[in-house]
Image (cartoon, rainbow, N blue to C red):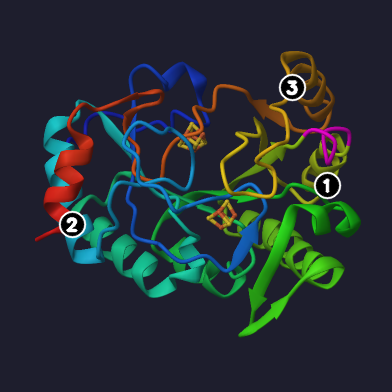
Amino acid sequence: METTEKKHVHPCFDESAKHSHARVHLPVAPKCNIQCNYCNRKYDCVNETRPGVTSSVLAPFQAADYLKALDAKLDNLSVVGIAGPGDPFANPEETLETMRSVKSIFPDKIFCLSTNGLDLEPYIDEIAELGVSHVTITINAIDPTISAKIYKWIRYNKHVYRGLEGARILLERQLTCIPLLKAKGITVKINSIIIPGINEDHIPEVARKCAELGADVINCIPLIPTAETGFADTPKPDSKMIFKTRTLASEHLKLMSHCARCRADAAGLLGQDLEGTHALLKEYASR
Ligand code: SF4
Ligand code: SF4
């Protein structure tokens, strides 16, 4: 049930809340405007826990009803977020319509968006007005020669760009957004995927640059090598590499190290999704 007396806390930004405050990702954004070489959104396996996976996609009107049903089942649903399964701003109508209806029903929840940042800038005023207080931008490199190995293509203003050209555009768009979000009082988290042999030594530089622009926290996430992607055969980063990357990055930015690498349809406490979520999601997706 919605309650106003309980203080909402974001469990991703405050580790002490991870066992007490729930979050839900509303999977309303299926398309993406870039292709990361580690991403495969083809599968909808209910047992697979990684970003980009959802068992169903919801239309905005379905999302609002689904959220009401979830809120009745969850004890302390604090955060409503959109994290794909594609990118929120490759689906701006769906994203904004969903946020508007969520805000009208649950005005005091924390609103959170996770994006690659390419098409975020035109929507910053509107999301701030809608009360979005937390935005995550995934920035894996600030050197376009490194980014060019991570992104297969980007689509910007209806053109597809590859290689260095695409990497430069993406980076410029991402870095532009950080101070604009901060000027609206929005908390900015940077996600960086640790990709062995590609960017593990470079992520501290990402942290340094993003800190300079005003970002608040960095989340260095180990690569999940995924079938049918450019990094399918790349080994997972070992614990030594993860520790070193995070330690060096934390010299510049506050570190988040409890990320559960959630699905695009995650619902519940971090790492402990509510039982029956997939069936509920399917039910609302078919209404
Ligand atoms: Fe996948 Fe997200 Fe990259 Fe798009 S931005 S390709 S959804 S990981
Ligand atoms: Fe939080 Fe990480 Fe899950 Fe996103 S993927 S909701 S940052 S724990």
Name the amino acid type tagged 1. Glu
Q: Is residue 72 above or below residue 140?
A: above
- Looking at this view, is 120 or 45 the one in front? 45
Q: Residue at x 16, y 40 (%)?
A: 279
Locate residue 29 relative to residue 144 in the image: left or right. Answer: left
Task: For mark 1, give the secondary structure.
Answer: helix
| Separation of residues labelled 2 and 1 (CA atoms) | 42 Å
For the C terminus, the quadrant is: bottom left
Q: Position of residue 242 (x, y in %)?
A: 74, 22
* Mark closest to the chain's N terminus, 3 or 1: 1
Q: Is mark 1 within 8 Å of ligand 2?
A: no
Q: Residue at left 69%, top 56%?
A: 178
Q: Nearer the viewer, residue 265 or 131?
A: 265
Magenta-colored span: 196-201
Query: Type of residue at label 3?
Result: Ile
Does the magenta segment cover residue 22? no
Q: Indicate the position of residue 265 as horizontal and vertical percent values.
A: 34, 44
Q: Which residue is mark 1?
A: 212
Q: Earlier in the sequence, mark 2 or mark 3?
A: 3
Among the 4 quarters of the image, the one containing residue 174 = bottom right
Please tell me the numbered disc located at residue 285.
2
Q: Residues within 10 Å of mark 1 (few under 14, many from 20)?
A: few
Callout 3: few (<14), some (14-19), or many (20+) C-alpha neighbours within 10 Å?
Answer: some
Quadrant assignment for the N terminus = top left
Q: Position of residue 212 (x, y in %)?
A: 83, 47
| Residue 143 appears in the picture as rendered | yes
Q: Which mark is residue 170?
A: none
